[in-house]
Amino acid sequence: SITAVCQLFANNYYRSLFHVLPPCASPPPPTTTNTNIIITEQSHSDLCHRRVQVLINSIAPADIAAFSSATSSVVAASACASGPGSPSCFHRGNTTDIMAPAALERLTQCGQGHVFQYWDELSDEEKRTLEQQVAELESSSKGGFASLKPTLEDALKKHEEARTGEIEGPPAAWLAKADGSDLVAEARWEGLGLDLIAAGKCAACVLAGGMGTRLGSSFPKGMLGDPETTNEPFLPSNKSLFQVYSERIRTLQRRAKEKAGLDKEPVIMFLVMTGEPTHAAIVEFFQARQFFGLQPEQVIFFPQGVMPCFGLDGKVLMESKGRIAVSPDGNAGIYAALRRQGVLGKLEFSGVQWVQVFSVDNVLIRVADPVWFGYCEETQADVVVKSVPKRDWSEAVGVVTLRGGKPGVIEYSEIGEERAKETTASGELRYNAANICLQAYSLDFLSGPAQDYPTIWHVAKKDIPTVDGKTPGIKLEGFIFDVFEVARNFRLLQVDRSSEFSAIKNASDSGKPDTPQTALISLSRLHRKWLRAAGAPIPEDDGEQGLEAVCEISPLLTYRGEGLTEVAKTVDPAANPILLQ
């Protein structure tokens, strides 16, 4: 049945979506009449048709509309041996979906039958929602629900064990610098990167699925600074992080057009990874603001996956009587989500070869950095990670290392004080390459090794809201950097922290570092530096954080400080804030 539906679509983009669906074991050959699929065996109709329906539901409405004539004819004539009117079936249009009995048996066999314990108390809509959630969770993991408890047990075992393996600092052969110490190399990489952008070979992806909980708000972090959405003041321009990132892309497209002498601007694909609770809000935010000047078709929204939350006994927890408690599957979820949502196929069709991935909460991020793209192209690396030197040995940040002969990241909690203090013969910290969640990949790597790599699940023990109140439980998440170990050509690009990294993790009044206020200070200092270099009569910073004038330059005026000579002449050095739109 899956093969038949795939033939109906006859399109590589949709065909790629089938990779997430486990094959049906020894299915009977389907009998087809025109485009109607007739499934003749009960055991396979239960399993196969449900997976086909999940696939159809996973395709965006705008995309599926083009294939409505094909999908509308997909039916399961014998979806229930007892007939469509039996209690084990329900009808949606002209499709027949299998309800609790089939799923209940499978879940009971693997110790998760309690998911349906409130079945008789649910409305028809709640039943449909629960059955669909079960189907999606089964289809998104190899082995379905039967694999969940072994996965949890394996993660717990690894969590309790000390990780082993010889650890070394990153080899010199990995490292290049784009921190201002070699302007000739940077200019070469930037030119090459702009050529790649002009040829339509570049994409940027923001990891934007998280809520701003630690900022004391309930909105997605990328909306920070938008006065219509948030109460947290940020930039003088009232631009959100999403707007700043989008405008940086627009500037690069303009620069690439000018360099290549093109008639129209090239397109940098902008991928926005959302989460289950943030997807609709983020899509609506972009739509209501006309995608901040980007073309709607160049912005691709895709949700990361989820994992069930577990009780300490290994059973999945119920958020309500008709819904399993789930949590995001971590930033490693990007790899499966890119495939599951068909994004890899779209990128390949568009001719993209390189993808830069960054966290949503870094106000200084050089989105779609041409220097970075150029270095990727020159080295033909699978993965290139940007890093900055640690402030000192005690900075609570993971570091890029060589573990057991393979590239990886050691978390701050793993490395230990003695090892963190080790230095090289030149006096530098041996483990000094701070991981700041900036990674670039070849599309070949994302489509191949990253898809074959089994997720390493990490344990987070938390109190989880359930139908029975808050319950001690376990969340599993994957880390984006675990896959680095299968990169055959791995590189590090060291950059200047003051120019490229200022995270936003906590509320400004929290008394903690990495707040919107500290990010604004970092941005202001960088922009004042640019203006001084362009000739503006702005005094040197005195070193006292926050005492200098707030300064913001629109990303539409400059990307990294270039082209500001004329603008600098208009700057009033006594103004506060200095805002150049």
Image: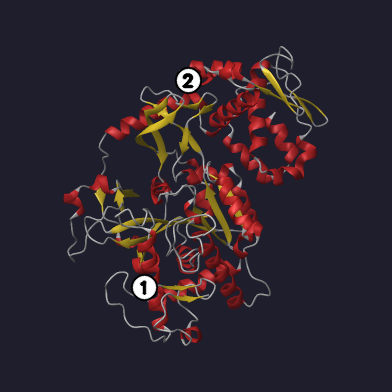
Q: Which residue is nearer to you in this view: 399 or 28?
A: 399
Which residue shows up at 22% across the image and 55% down it?
Answer: 394
Q: Amino acid at mark 2?
A: Gln
- Give the side of residue 179 with respect to residue 340, left or right: left
Percent of width and height locating residue 565: 48, 85
Q: Is residue 14 above or below residue 535?
A: above
Tell me where residue 456 sits by quadrant.
top left
Residue hosting label 1 = 525
Residue hosting label 2 = 112
Percent of width and height locating residue 463: 36, 32
Q: Is residue 300 above or below residue 556?
A: above
Q: Which residue is nearer to you in this view: 570 or 300?
A: 570
Percent of width and height locating residue 415: 24, 47
Residue found farthest to the top: 82
Q: Residues within 10 Å of mark 2 (few under 14, many from 20)?
A: many
Residue 379 visible in rendering: yes
Q: Is residue 581 above or below residue 154?
A: below
Please tell me which of labels 1 and 2 falls first in the chain.
Answer: 2
Residue 493 visible in rendering: no
Tell me the CA gap for discs 1 and 2. Answer: 55 Å
Q: Amino acid at mark 1?
A: Arg
